Amino acid sequence: MIDTTDNDDDQIAGVTIGLLDVFLSTTLVFILISSLLWGIIAEAQRQAALATTELDATKKHSASALAVALARIKALEQEVALLNAEAERHRQQPIIIPNELNGNVLFDPGEATIRASFIPTLRTYTDQLLTAFNAGQFDSAVVAGHTDERHIHNWKYADNWDLGAARATAIVRYLIARGVPADRLSAASYGELHPLNAGRDESAWRMNRRIEIVMLHREGQWQSAR
């Protein structure tokens, strides 16, 4: 009888060794794959961290750029406000022709006829207007008549509105005669409603009786020609 025990043991040992080789090979492959995956994961995490850092930097840069832009806008708004304030200051400074100057009277009380003695003085103001118009600085002018607070009512003028309007119109006609284009002039009256001096004596009344000439700038803004 043949003894097969040794052969069986050898076969079992061979199978065991084969299985062990397969296990070791599989384990090695698993380790290699795991290492590769962990490397990929680590690289992905590194890239994600880098992207986050770049995004934060971009946000900070954008915030800084926005702050600069807002500061510039604020500065421009302040500049525009200053320019508007300066324009308003000029708008409130028309050419003022007092009714009495250096002993000469422009209009007698209650009248709207220009006195001859005031013509040389009036010519000086007219020359200012002509210079401004000829230089193209202004498009038109509004001549406004102002009276003192003492009321008037006669066959010529119903009130100070009428008197102021008549005096302004007299100045407009004089300016036209001196060469100022008629289509660039207009007349207005404020009566006694816009005094320069709120006093109620002759000194205040003398100051409040006046003609004001306001220039209209070519861009539509009221300006002084002085």
Image (cartoon, helix red, strand yellow):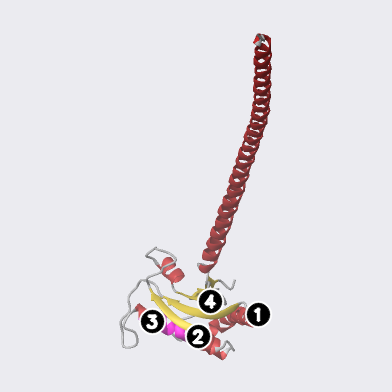
Say whether disc 2 or disc 3 marks the residue closer to the N-terminus: 3
Q: Secondary structure at mark 1?
A: loop
The disc labelled 1 sits on which kind of residue? Answer: Ala
Q: Residue at x 43, y 70 (%)?
A: 208
Q: Confirm or deny contact between disc 1 and disc 3 (CB under 8 A).
A: no
> Looking at the picture, how far across and down is residue 189, in whole percent?
41, 78
Q: Alpha carbon of mark 4 to alpha carbon of mark 3: how far?
A: 24 Å
Q: Locate residue 134: give its quadrant.
A: bottom right
Nearer the observer: mark 2 or 4; the answer is: 4
Q: Confirm or deny contact between disc 2 and disc 4 (CB under 8 A).
A: no
Nearer the observer: mark 2 or 3; the answer is: 2
**Res. 174 visible in picture:** no
Say whether disc 4 or disc 3 marks the residue closer to the N-terminus: 3
Residue identified by numbered label 2: 172
Q: Alpha carbon of mark 1 to alpha carbon of mark 3: how far?
A: 33 Å
Q: Confirm or deny contact between disc 4 and disc 3 (CB under 8 A).
A: no
> Looking at the picture, how far across and down is residue 68, in whole percent?
61, 49
Q: Nearer the viewer, residue 130 or 139?
A: 139
Q: Alpha carbon of mark 2 to alpha carbon of mark 4: how far?
A: 15 Å
Q: Which residues are magenta?
A: 162-170
Residue identified by numbered label 1: 135
Q: Is residue 102 above or below residue 155?
A: above
Q: Alpha carbon of mark 2 to alpha carbon of mark 1: how far?
A: 20 Å
Residue furthest out toward the bottom:
177
How packed is label 2: few (under 14 Cα within 10 Å), some, or many (20 or more)? many
Mark sitting on residue 163 = 3
The disc labelled 3 sits on which kind of residue? Answer: Leu
